[in-house]
Each structure stands twice: as C-alpha cells, then as structure tokens.
Amino acid sequence: MHAGASAAAESFVAALAGIDWSRPWFQPFAARGAALAAAVHRGADLRALLDAQSGALGLRNARGLSLRFVPQQALAEGSAYEAHIDATGEVPTRDNLHDFFNALVWLHFPQAKRVLNQIQATVIAREGVRTARGGVRDAATLFDENAVLFMSEGDEHAEALRGFAWQQLFVARRHAWDTACRVVPFGHALLEKLVRPYKAVTAHAWTLPLVPGGAPDMLDKAVALSLQAAAVAGTLRGGRCFAPLPVMGIPGWCDDNASPGFYADTTVFRPGRMRDLRRQPD
C-alpha cells in the first residue's frame, strides 16, 4: 500500500473512531455500525465485511442481482453510479464516512434503497446523464442523501411541520414525541453531518403514517411503497415534495432545545416562505 492510500486508510479509521453511537440519531444503526467500525479498526476490509452482511441478509438490487460492495475502481470512467448498481448489483464504496453510512443504510433499508436506485436508473436509461438531474432524479437524490423519515399519528404534527409552526411542533406538542410522532434518519450525507452536529443541520423530511411497533422491516416496506406510489403519481419531483426539518430541534436530540427560546432563532427555524402560485412546476 502506497503512502497516500495508507494515510487515507488511517484517516478513515480515525473518523470511524470519532462516531458517538450513543447519539439518538444513530440509535437505529448503532449495533451494526459500531460492530463494523470496530472490525475496520482491527484491520478488516470494509467491503468484505459489508459483502458478508449483504449475503447473510440476501440483499438484491431491482434486477434480482446479489448486492455487493466493491472498490470505487469498479465504476468505469463516465459510468453513472446509480446505473452501475442497477446493471451489476455492485455498490462502489470508498473508505470514507459518506460511503460507510450509505452502505449502512443499504443494510437497514434495502427495500427503500432498491426502489430509489431503480427510480434513478430508469430516468438515466430514458434521459441519459445530464448536467441537471431533472425533477425526479433530483428528488430521489435528495431523499438518498439527506432525508429523514417523519412519522406521525393523525395530521397535527405533519401539518405543523409543513407550515413551519415550530413552536407548535416542538413546544406545544412536545409531550407527544416518541409516541404520536417520531423520526428516523435515512440520508447518508445527513448521517455524516451528524457525526459533528451543529444547530443549523436541516434534513428533507418525508412524511409517513406512524408505523405500528416501529419494526425496521415494516418501516423499510412502508418507505419503499410510499416512494413507488409517489413515483407513479408524479409527486416525487424536486425539493418541494419534502418539508425542511432542522433536526437539532427534535426533542431529545439536543439538550439546549429543552428551552422554548431555542426555537426563536429564525436563521434556523425560519417562518416559512411565500409560495408563488404562478410558479412553474419543479
């Protein structure tokens, strides 16, 4: 291994060691993530570890091909990443936190990730790879990179979220969090940012009915079905199919937000935007 590769590997191991798996946003991924990080620290190859887990779980892409995690060099120059996964079942994976969290989400949400990949690959096959992704690919990419799953009973929490009613969502309805409302991170870039969180971290919230019991496989299926339905209906398009959610406002995610004054910072908890009813579709 040359010096540059060795330095990059050491940097990756150090970055993994810096993850605090006790943080509430990592809770859904903590057991598997911490075990993978510990094995890499002992010298194991990340892709070999991921392949073993993918094989044990029987993960496949939309074409039914076994999902495998391969070095970045497997992606030929000029090839689209999403199209490569769809055509081969190979997920090019680098030794960095971004790709580590991407793989971790594949292991936890294989049905939803498979649907996202199929949506991306279908658009690429139809339109080719363009400088501008277009509405559908843009929405799928935002979901993949920065989504949080926002689940609630009834409409109160979701309406407050969409209406930028932060005091109602986080203060007046605070008692209902974790019972009538809860969130689960999905986007791997979001998870990477949350290794070193800051107040302004904002996710793209995808609203869903509360999944009874919170079983991971049931949630995965619910997300996959909602994405398929949105793609068919044409509502998976651009950034406006999400609601912005400053995640440090979530009760229990930040000690400082126990005070209602935390939400008075309008640079983070913005009052909303005026919608131009004459605007063109995304």
Image (tube, rainbow, N blue to C red):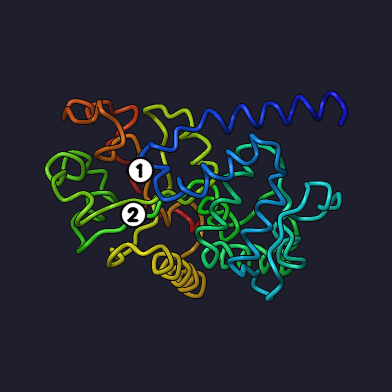
- Residue 100 spot, x, y in % from top left: 61, 44
Viewer-proximal residue among 192 and 208: 192
Amino acid, disc 2: Phe
Amino acid, disc 1: Leu
Viewer-proximal residue among 42 and 225: 42
Distance of label 2 from label 1 (alpha carbons): 9 Å
Mark 2 and mark 1 residues within 8 Å of each other at the beta carbon: yes
Neighbour tally class for label 2: few under 14, some 14-19, many 20 plus, Cα within 10 Å: many
* Residue at image mark 1: 245
Neighbour tally class for label 1: few under 14, some 14-19, many 20 plus, Cα within 10 Å: many
- Residue 268 spot, x, y in % from top left: 34, 30
Camera-nearest label, 2 or 1: 2
Q: Secondary structure at mark 1?
A: strand
Q: The N terminus lies in which quarter of the figure?
A: top right
Label of residue 150 in the image: 2
Residue 130 horizontal side relative to residue 162, left or right: right
Which quadrant of the figure has residue 256? top left
